[in-house]
Image (cartoon, rainbow, N blue to C red):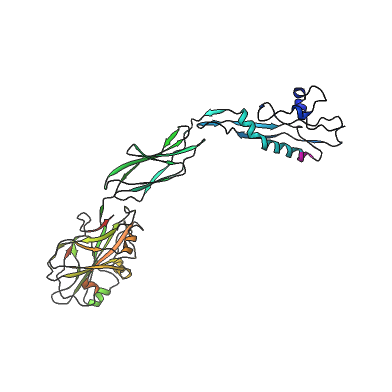
Amino acid sequence: MENTGYKSFAFLEKYYTDNNTSTEEIKPNVATDPDYIAPALDTTMCPPVNRFYNTQQTKTVTKNNCSPGETGTEVQLIAYANQFVSYENIADANNQAIIWLENNAQIYANNSGTCIADSIPPTSPFLSVSSITPNSLILSWTPSTDNGILAGYDIYQNGVLLTSTSSDVLRCPITGLSAASTYTFYVKAKDVAGNSSNSNVLTITTLPSTLSLAAVQSVIFEKRSRSWDDCRNALAADLQYTDNTFMGAAVTADNLLYYLNRYRGVIDTSSITIKPKSAKIKFKFAENTVGNALTFNLFGSNIQIPVNQEFQLPDWNDWDNSTFINSISVPRNSTTYNEINLTPAQLDLLVSGQAYNFFLISNGDKESYDPISNNRPVLSISAETGQVYLECLF
């Protein structure tokens, strides 16, 4: 007897009026008939000796042809048991069912599923800031997720919409700001349905065009010795001062005792997030009755003292591992500010850590000749007076 093709026991009553009806004539269309489940099984009157039928298989997909702002429901398409036949084995019958589900589940879901208006907002982004200058900064945020389609982000400055970005942009440079001014920023994530959620709010103060940072750790080390060579080459200082004292080298009137003083300072540079265009160390003397001009040398220390760490006497000799930056000649009796510019390499150090370490040393200390006078200027190292500080230009 001729095999007429696939027919389903479950749908014989619906699709057959007698045994002579061809399955190809009445086979429904899965794309237009939501009641249609699977093709019919073979019901030929003279089947082969061995026939194998599938076990139940399912596939669940989401309706994906909804309008923007709507979410499709999940729909399950079922290939019921005994709806696919194989003359080889059950695995082959199951594979037929699985292939049929793969080809038809999405079509079935799009025809029979439901579209629901999206009311779920995106997740909130987390906003952060970097590269603050007197006139600009950069905002960055973490990506938001949404159950539908994420439309993008709105950036607000002082509560006013500044600009918008697409959903794949997570960074926004902000320009045109005023120096030393405070601003608030937040980012709003939005989806195509109109739902939205805000990020955290950042309050940011721009840098001044010129940034002045007083030394937060300051000390003048002193070494006393009857030998000038021992005095300047000693492994550690004898005393240290955290208030005003003398700078440079001297000898007593009877030439029996030498004095040597070195200034060391630490400046907190954590507020500097970008490399300055230029920077300088500025200092002035509280008293200066020296009759001759003095040369002062600036060294950047390669051995760093953390901002909150107290100085120790062994820090006296760290300058031996330091890098010479520049020098300046201070006129006699001068109490005006003196400036020593930092080198380009030293500018890089300002943004590499939390502290900038330096030495200020007089020519009587640096050179090998004996000091001939006990007249030395008094340097104010108080952070409150700010008479030793770093000045940066952005």
Q: Position of residue 33 (x, y in %)?
A: 67, 27
Residue extending furthest toward the front:
25
Asked whether residue 215 appears in the rendered view, the answer is: no
Seen in the picture, residue 205 relative to 83 is either above or below; the reply is: below
Image quarter where the C terminus lies is: bottom left
Asked whether residue 334 appears in the rendered view, the answer is: yes
Residue 325 quadrant: bottom left
Seen in the picture, residue 134 relative to 75 is either above or below; the reply is: below
Q: Is residue 130 left or right of residue 361?
A: right
Q: In front here: 125 or 255?
A: 125
How many numbered tags mark residues here? 0
Image quarter where the N terminus lies is: top right
Q: Position of residue 216 (x, y in %)?
A: 27, 56
Seen in the picture, residue 349 relative to 178 is either above or below; the reply is: below
Q: Position of residue 57 (x, y in %)?
A: 70, 35
Q: Is residue 87 magenta?
A: yes
Q: Is residue 372 left or right of residue 275?
A: left
Q: Position of residue 254 (x, y in %)?
A: 13, 77
Residue 319 quadrant: bottom left
Question: Residues in magenta?
Answer: 83-92
